[in-house]
Amino acid sequence: MKVFLAVDAGGTKTDLVLVDETRELVRVRSGTIKRMRVDEQTAARNLDEALSELSRRAGISMRSVIGTCIGTAGDSVPLVVNWLRTAFAERVSGGLLLLGDVEIALDAAFPGQSGILVLAGTGSNVAGRTAGGKVSTVGGWGPVLADQGSGHSIGVATLRALFLARDGGRPTQLAAAVLEFWKLTSLEELIAFANAKPAPDFSRLARLTLSCAESGDAVAAEVLRQEGESLAQLVALMIRRLQQDAESGGVLPPIAFAGSVMENVLPVRQALMQGLRNEFPGIQMLSGVVDPINGAVWRARREFSGAPYAS
């Protein structure tokens, strides 16, 4: 039996699946192993616990794995990729394929086919594949430079919106909700807390903003709509890029979605979809969200099914 490992290393959690050539054997979830989010000790502890649980439940040693595919945000950041390569080489046998999280999600939606994947969770990214198989991305430059429509971006936009509303005398539930969420007693404390180093996890405010919007808060609703529209602008860039590809023949590519924001913060997704329909009538968008780790499974089997066992 050939055994493969697939990993989706996100900003807040890590999903790992052990599979053979046809079946899923065991699936576990641990804390994040992304070095931009946690220190080395925490990442190593989370990884060790997850691999131990996989081995225990499957009855299979990690030294039996012939190939691992990891999808991770920050795949262009040396701190992230260098640690992952070293950590997995020390713990898991076989070959290693390291990809962006948006690319494995693209494979989950359109394995080996043309299409666009919109990923929005803690961060965001958009990947597209041409009819000839070339993969490219737009966005995904991290929380300071990009990440439109992400949990982080929603959180930061929420804080800016509540202070702008205060300056303009506009009513909103957001200030009281954020103070309660972070156990603060005043806006002065919030200012210090939000500007602290290290910064708090702004992405945790996304669900709070959604709750306020659902209860009728116009300021919160505007934050979510604007984040969806910003993400739609990135997707539109990718659509035009693929349409210009000679092998694609100008055909509108299908769109798929992944990530916690796309799954749970529906106003962002709805604003994104409406913006795309306005600009590209007739565009096809898949319902629901895809599970990125299924793309990592597909790639691991594809890349390593013929590889010999590592010594």
Image (tube, helix red, strand yellow):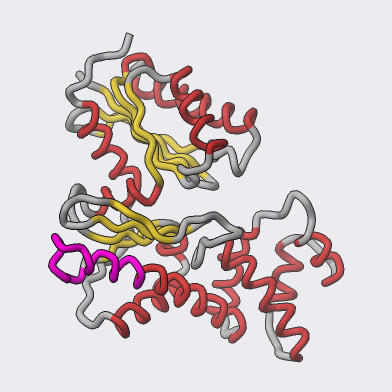
Q: Can see residue 248? A: yes
Image point 66% across, 78% down: which residue?
A: 161
Reply above or below: 62 against 296: above
The N terminus, quarter of image? top left
Which residue of the protein is positioned furthest toward the top in this rendering?
Answer: 311
Image point 54% across, 47% down: which residue?
A: 12
Image point 23% across, 83% down: which residue?
A: 281
Q: Nearer the viewer, residue 57 or 229?
A: 229
Q: Which residues are magenta?
A: 236-252
The C terminus, quarter of image? top left
Taking the magenta stretch, the answer to whether it contains residue 210 is no
Would you say 168 lies left or right of 286 here?
right
Q: In which quarter of the view is residue 302 placed?
A: top left
Residue 96 image offset from top left, x and y in percent:
36, 27
Would you say 193 lies left or right of 220 here?
right
Reply above or below: 21 against 165: above
Q: Nearer the viewer, residue 111 or 74?
A: 74
Residue 212 image offset from top left, x and y in percent:
60, 76
Image point 17% across, 23% down: which residue?
A: 306
Secondary structure, magenta segment, majority class: helix
Residue 222 image offset from top left, x and y in percent:
55, 82
Q: Nearer the viewer, residue 264 or 4?
A: 4
Taking the magenta stretch, the answer to whether it contains residue 250 is yes
Which residue of the protein is positioned furthest toward the bottom in this rendering?
Answer: 169
Reply above or below: 151 against 217: above
